Image (cartoon, grey):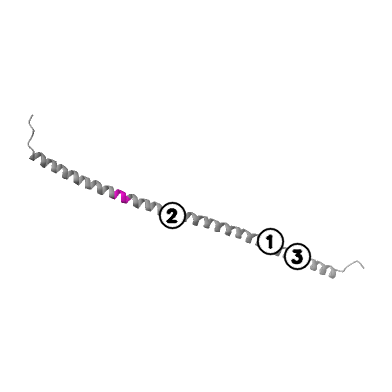
Amino acid sequence: HNQINADQQAALEEAFRRGVAHATLHAAAAGEAVDADRKVRHLELDRDEARERASRLAAERDGLLARQAALEGELRRARREVEQVTTRLKHREVDLRRLGADMSAYASETPALED
């Protein structure tokens, strides 16, 4: 009675194949789920790193913009000082010319001293 006929053998083999196929599909699905979870964790890590980098770059940009504004202010002050110095020098030049003209006029009016 322990013997099985060919039809029973074929039925058992078919059931076995279906079971193996079913188990393989479940294992593949489970593996895909693990892979999907792993991919999600990697993507979340990438996202978090990108956010941190964006935050750092934004802070750096803000610092650079503040420094640029300060340097532009210093440049404006320096230009004003140069303009003021240039104006004072022009005034002194005019004064010296006038003084030179006055000295020439004075010298021509004053009799020469004889030794």
**Principal SS element in the magenta part?**
helix
Quadrant including the N terminus: bottom right
27 and 38: which is toward the camera: 38
Residue 71's x, y, as percent? Answer: 39, 51
Residue drawn at x 12%, y 41% is 104
Give the alpha-carbon distance from disc 1 to disc 2, as whole Å. 48 Å
Find numbered disc 3 in the image and state the secondary structure of the residue it sits on: helix
Quadrant including the C terminus: top left
Find numbered disc 1 in the image and state the secondary structure of the residue it sits on: helix
Find numbered disc 2 in the image and state the secondary structure of the residue it sits on: helix
- Magenta part of the chain: 79-83
- Residue placed under numbered mark 1 in the picture: 34
The disc labelled 2 sits on which kind of residue? Ala
Q: Nearer the viewer, mark 1 or mark 2?
A: 2
- Residue placed under numbered mark 2 in the picture: 66
| Marks 1 and 2, the one that precedes in the sequence | 1
Residue 69's x, y, as percent? Answer: 40, 54
View extreme (top): residue:
115
The disc labelled 1 sits on which kind of residue? Val
Task: Describe residue 2's horizontal placement relative to residue 90 as left or right.
Answer: right
